[in-house]
Structure formats: structure tokens, C-alpha cells
């Protein structure tokens, strides 16, 4: 995580060389950027239920959206194995998924991918990995 501080030094030195911001003594100011603490969310996106024997989880491809309580949501691609992973700032998230294998059809015939949700909010702590299953439950 040294990249943000390195960028701060480069920006400050570049600005001083170009006649940019300087302190009263004529030396460049050092601007330090602090990266927010992060953790990792990993999980599996799957369908479950349906015809007998039912209750069998089937991984599905698609997208998973990780939506923080405060901030901008991110969307990650999910491969055929249903697995996904993302590094995110510490916080609480709702996690949902969409797959082209599960669609809703409107009375007019328009098809849209159904949204499936993790059953509980996902809490990410600094330096840790949090596992979250995202399931589409089929009756």
C-alpha cells in the first residue's frame, strides 16, 4: 500500500518544479494520501431448489453487485464456477447477483434478469476475507 504516498511525493515534487505550491521557505510541500483500510469479499453465486431432488446448489455465471451503505456500488463478473472476489473498503455491504440463466418475463414478453440477494448484510473488516453466498432460490 505504498503507492498512494509515492503518488503524493511525485505530485508535490512535480508541482514545485513547475512553479506550483511551495511553503514559505521555498521547498515543496509533501502531500500524503492515506488509502482507506480494505478487506476482501469472496463468494459463490448459485441457484438452488427446483425439481426433485431440489436443494442442490448449481453455480451460475453472471454479475454480482457489492453495494455499500455509503458510497458507490461495484459490479464484478462471475465465471461459470460461480466464484467471485473483490477488494473493498471496510464497511457493511448488501450483495446481489444477476444471471442470464434466470429471467422474469413481463406480460408484454420483455425479459429481464432476476436479482438474487445474499441473505444477510456483509461486513468487511480491515485485512480480512469475508465469505458470502449469493443464492437464487427456485421454488
Image (tube, rainbow, N blue to C red):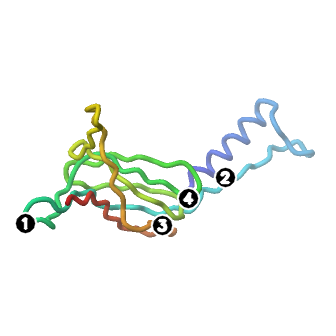
Quadrant in the rendering for residue 48: bottom left
Characterize the local packing of mark 2: few (<14), some (14-19) or many (20 or more) Cα atoms within 10 angstroms: some
**Numbered mark located on residue 33 in the image:** 2
Element type at marker 3? strand
127 with respect to 76 (left or right): right
Q: Residue at x 75, y 35 (%)?
A: 15
Q: Which tag, 1 or 2, sits closer to the chain's start? A: 2
Tag 3 residue? 124
Q: Which of marks 4 and 2 is in front?
A: 4
User: Residue 5 appears at what percent x and percent y?
Assistant: 63, 52
Residues tagged 1 and 2 counted as in contact (Cβ below 8 A): no
Which circle's residue, 1 or 3, is located before the other in the chain?
1
* Label of residue 20 in the image: none
Q: Is mark 4 on a helix, strand or loop?
A: loop
Answer above or below: position of 57 versus 81: below
In this view, the residue farthest toward the right is 24
Total labels drawn:
4
Disc ID at residue 53: 1
- Label 4 neighbourhood size at 10 Å, few (<14), some (14-19), many (20+)? few
Q: In which quarter of the image is the N terminus?
A: bottom right
Give the distance between the C-alpha atoms of the residues marked 3 and 4, in whole angstroms.
12 Å
Q: Name the residue under label 4.
A: 69
Q: CA separation, marks 1 and 3?
A: 35 Å
Quarter that holds the C terminus:
bottom left
- Residue at the spot 45% in from the left edge and 66% down from the top edge: 121
Q: Is mark 1 on a helix, strand or loop?
A: loop
x and y percentages locating residue 81 in the rendered image: 20, 53
Amino acid at each position: 500500500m505504498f503507492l498512494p504516498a509515492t503518488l503524493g511525493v511525485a505530485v508535490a515534487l512535480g508541482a514545485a518544479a513547475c512553479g506550483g505550491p511551495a511553503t514559505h521557505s521555498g521547498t515543496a510541500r509533501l502531500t500524503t494520501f492515506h488509502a482507506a483500510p480494505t478487506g476482501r469479499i469472496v463468494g459463490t453465486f448459485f441457484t438452488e431448489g427446483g425439481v426433485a431432488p431440489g436443494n442442490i446448489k448449481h453455480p451460475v455465471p453472471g454479475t454480482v453487485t457489492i453495494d455499500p451503505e455509503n458510497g458507490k456500488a461495484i459490479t464484478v463478473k462471475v465465471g461459470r464456477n460461480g466464484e467471485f472476489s473483490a477488494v473493498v473498503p471496510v464497511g457493511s455491504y448488501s450483495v446481489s447477483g444477476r444471471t442470464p440463466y434466470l429471467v422474469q418475463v413481463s406480460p408484454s414478453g420483455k425479459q429481464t434478469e432476476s436479482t438474487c440477494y445474499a441473505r444477510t448484510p456483509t461486513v468487511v473488516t480491515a485485512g480480512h476475507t469475508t465469505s458470502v453466498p449469493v443464492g437464487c432460490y427456485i421454488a
